[in-house]
Amino acid sequence: MPKKRSGGGLSSTQQAAKFLGVSVLAGAVMAGIAVPAVGALGLAAKGSVESFDELPANMKTPPLSQRTTILDADGGHIATVYSRDRTVVDLKQISPYMQKAIVAIEDSRFYQHGAVDMKGVLRALNRNAQSGQVAEGASTLTQQYVKNVFVEEAGDDPTKVAEATQQTIGRKIRELKFAIQVEEELGKKKILENYLNITFFGQQAYGVEAAAERYFSKSAKDLTLPEAAMLAGIVQSPSRYDPVNDEAEATKRRNVVLQRMADVGDISQADADEAKEAPLELKVSRPQNGCITAVKGASFFCKYVEKVFLNDPVFGKTKEKRAKIWNQGGLTIRTTLDPQSQESVQASLKDHVNKDDSVAAATTLVEPGTGKILGMGQSKPFGYNKNETEYNYSVDASMGGSNYGFPTGSTFKPFVAAAALEEGRPPTQEYASPYDMAYPSPVQTCSGKQWVNTEGAKVENEDESEVGPYRLEEAMAKSVNTFFVEMISDIGLCPVMKMTENLHVVQGNGDKLPEVPAISLGSKGISPLTMASAYAAFASRGMYCSPIAIESITQKIGNEPKSLPVPKSTCSRAMSEQTADTVNTLLRGVVDSGTGQEAGLNDRESAGKTGTTDERKNAWFVGYTPNLSGAVWVGSATQQVKMEGISIGGQYHAKVYGGQVPGPIWRDAMSGALVGREADSFNIIDIPDAPDEDEERGRGDEDQGNGPGNGNGNGPGNGNGNNGGLVDGGADGGFPAPSFSIPEGFIRGGDTGGTGPGGNGPGDTGDATGGP
């Protein structure tokens, strides 16, 4: 084995260069500090400075990067995130043993000299000259602090770090200048405090507080003599003296520190000898960094909070400025997450869906009237291993979600109904609603250009027994496809587009919904958070409030906290109170006697809508009470799993419907979240029953004319695909299978790979058939 070279492994040339640098530096210190101009020393080469007086008058000391703490609405801990694990503390919060130990081993004459220790420089120069190599350095604690500031300021930029640590005479003189300034402005105690907060102690711990927590799971103020000596010894070489990886080497180094403390009179020799005999007694706390460590399954919500910070201009005009603040850390972020709601969300998901199932589930809870996100979770945990994912299925792609969201099926139909009510259609509105029909054409759009069914596409209900005429209330409860096709044909596309804009319903990729009939099917991908927020507008009697995740932020710069502005929910009227109350009445019928009965709550009023998509690739339940709205999606993120003959959560399902799997998840999540909360009531609208003669309607003997009004025919204003056929099935209560295919090329502007929920109509992303 080759012998290790003396001089710390430096070659002869490197040793000579370093020795020359120290010698020249000593001369510069002795001559230049006393005589301001050092240009005569010939230090004009690259990496040096031209004049002592031309150096900046004030040293720019950046705020130390610290850990950021994310809290729930009650102040409970969710997660800690940081680029550097550091908690800045006052000197009085640091053990006196620690203060003495670091001074003794790093700069024992710290309180006797100024910024530069002239005796130390001469001593080092003499020893280095005698040995012909660099055997001893002469940097004071103040100079080390200055160097650490440069490194801190460089952040994680390799080029800047290299510049901050380059071995040039110019940099050393620059450090000396700033060291003198720091001594004058801060004083010894503040310098020591800053040094102990900035220096690196290994194992991702920056500063003594983080180091005390990492190695001994305690605060810096509680460090004992042996513990303080061990930490002080690490600073010179954190990797060499790492006690986790080499306890013997760390013990030897600790004992060197203890002896030095005795030699300078900080402790007695007896105390030093006793401490040397003590074992290290490490109690290591592994780094808990990032949202992956979040409690209560809140990792995805935690990442959403981070995305909000990095994307919202309220935190900085540019992405770079926002990222700098985030990486700087020192933030205490109190969020809107309600611990009771979050626990209920995760418990419900765990009870109904296994993480290793072939499909996943995502649930989001939002508070109507405030937009506060109270719960957010999914069945597959946050991570990068099998049956884990880093994608948040509850949010848009820009916030860490899937590329396009997920087709929503018949949960889109309430938006169509709301648009029709706003247009003056009564809650008793009736359409012919035959079992099947051609898409009515043309259909009016906002641009004035009409949509035309050039392909002759047809739409049908889920079961042949579903033959109209139907009124709105029954059609909503059974999710009659042809009814909603006729409705959107009657009112046109523009009112539906305006309603979805009022409710801020956009695709998962951020694009607006296309102005094509397929939107009535829910064929476009939308996120659960978007759906929960939109339905919350029904619950709050027509007021839409944008979702928010952050209540307040306090930033700690040094030891000084300051409040930062945070995004506020923006509330606006999306529809009249009358319209919202009518929709609430209609959707209450879905959970009372329609396709969503399995989602009904026993102790309070609730309303909601089920939805499934083509080939059972997605199943939804979106519902609400007057004070809480929630959306549940179940499916495969890749849209490759057909939920037929499938086991979910250990239970076999021949076919998955929105009322079967998502419904119970929603019910249990909402029930737990609402425990102890007031059971408010909806403002119910009286919707007259249909005349007796209508009870035997739709059995094949009615007029099937082609008039343009509300009859049974295919009037010219009736054209768009239908949303999911959420039906109770036939007389035996079964769930008939959806069936329908779209002629190739029928839809314009579609994305690939999507499947639209909804009855049998033209989907904008592909075939779209729906079920309950």
Image (tube, rainbow, N blue to C red):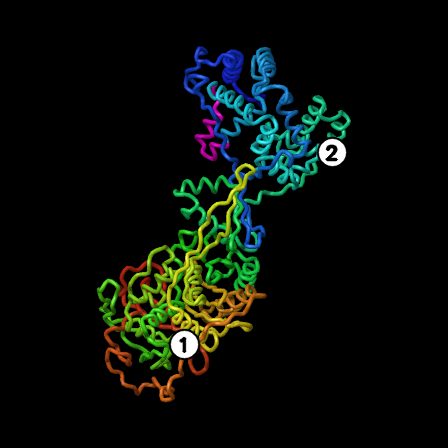
Q: Amino acid at mark 1?
A: Lys
Q: Residue 278 shows which numbered tag?
A: 2
Name the residue at 32% across, 79% down.
Answer: 431
Q: Is residue 321 left or right of residue 141?
A: left
Which stretch is magenta? 152-168
Q: Quadrant of residue 444?
A: bottom left
In this view, 100 is above or below 84: above
Residue 4 location in percent, x, y? 58, 22
Question: Residue at image x 55%, y 44%?
Answer: 289
Answer with the quarter of the image where residue 723 lies.
bottom left
* Circle 2 Cα neighbour tier, 10 Å, few/some/many (<14 / 14–19 / ≥20): few
Q: Is residue 73 visible?
A: yes
Q: Is residue 667 above or below residue 571?
A: below
Write down the residue under mark 1.
478
| SS under mark 2 | loop
- At label 2, which amino acid type do we have? Ala
Most foreground residue, 724 or 625: 625
Q: Label 2, label 1: how many angstroms apart (C-alpha)?
A: 76 Å
